[in-house]
């Protein structure tokens, strides 16, 4: 963590201004930079205003954990932009072993719950992207159609670094490219999608009861999942 993140508030006013390539946030006359000292250029005014609001809310020592939009924007600029093709390929590869394609062979009630939630998602992906994926039961993998994988790779490869930053969390936190795409394209709201990604875990909780530590971790992941969708919207807002 850079020393700049540990500084105390030194500014009076926070403002948003147009800049080359997008929008900038200024603390008085000083432009906000990333931790690596790159210009924090935001693609949309709503995202810049959200970043500005986070800086305006700081009192005393700067607290990065209270600034999720700023942190995501920093990641988009410093981490995703330099390796955007590699990040897109890594996320598209989730389709090869997508959560929605791997079903329980027993108990029957769990398998039926999975099918009821996930079969319509696979149908949606087939219709929306021309990418039919097939489900399998048990531990053996299923080889997905190369044309379907290629279609999904091409779609994800079209995301810019800011959308890809949001999409990374939608996919990684859910364990599913299909669920991530459904949230990104407003086919599912984030809460419904999160519940669909937790079918196996919720089943186990129903059988054995909750674990307080696991529940706390899950709550944090759920919050991050919602934040990822919010960042996606900010990246798309005009």
Image (tube, rainbow, N blue to C red):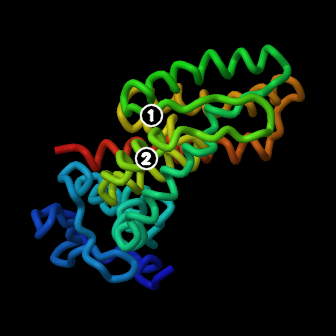
Pick the front one: 76 or 72: 76
Q: Is residue 141 left or right of residue 152?
A: right
Give the x, y percent position of residue 198: 67, 32
Label 1 or label 2, whichever comes before in sequence order? 1
Regarding mark 1 in the picture, which secondary structure is present there? loop
Regarding mark 2 in the picture, which secondary structure is present there? helix
Which dot marks residue 13? none
* Residue at image mark 2: 150
Q: What residue sits 22% from the left and 49% below the top?
A: 46
Q: Is residue 94 left or right of residue 11?
A: right
Q: CA distance from mark 1 to mark 2?
A: 8 Å
Q: What residue sits 23% from the left and 53% below the top?
A: 49
Question: Label 2: how many residues lie within 10 Å, few (<14), some (14-19) or many (20+)?
Answer: some
Q: What residue sits 77% from the left and 20% below the top?
A: 110
Pick the front one: 135 or 207: 135
Q: Is residue 162 left or right of residue 209?
A: left
Q: What residue sits 60% from the left and 20% below the top?
A: 117
Location of residue 45 with respect to 104 vertically, above or below: below
Give the x, y percent position of residue 158: 31, 52
Location of residue 235 with respect to 12 vertically, above or below: above
Give the x, y percent position of residue 159: 32, 52
Give the x, y percent position of residue 145: 53, 38
* Residue at image mark 1: 131
Figure disc tally: 2
């Amino acid at each position: 963590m850079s020393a700049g993140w540990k500084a105390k508030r030194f500014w009076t006013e926070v403002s948003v201004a147009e800049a080359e390539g997008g929008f900038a946030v200024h603390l008085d006359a000083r432009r906000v930079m990333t931790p690596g000292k790159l210009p924090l250029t935001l693609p949309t005014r709503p995202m810049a205003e959200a970043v500005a609001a986070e800086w305006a809310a700081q009192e005393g020592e700067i607290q990065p954990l209270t600034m999720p939009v700023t942190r995501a924007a920093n990641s988009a600029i410093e981490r995703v932009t330099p390796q955007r093709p590699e990040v897109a390929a890594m996320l598209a590869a989730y389709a090869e072993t997508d959560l929605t394609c791997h079903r329980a062979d027993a108990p029957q009630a769990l398998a039926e719950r999975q099918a009821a939630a996930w079969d319509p998602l696979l149908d949606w992906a087939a219709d929306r992207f021309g990418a039919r994926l097939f489900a399998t039961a048990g531990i053996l993998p299923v080889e997905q159609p190369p044309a379907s994988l290629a279609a999904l790779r091409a779609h994800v490869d079209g995301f810019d670094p800011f959308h890809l930053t949001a999409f990374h969390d939608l996919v990684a936190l859910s364990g599913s490219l299909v669920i991530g795409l459904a949230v990104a394209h407003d086919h599912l709201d984030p809460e419904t999608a999160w519940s669909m990604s937790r079918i196996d875990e919720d089943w186990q909780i129903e059988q054995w009861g909750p674990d307080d530590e696991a529940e706390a971790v899950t709550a944090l992941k759920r919050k991050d999942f919602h934040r990822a969708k919010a960042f996606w919207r900010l990246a798309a807002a005009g």
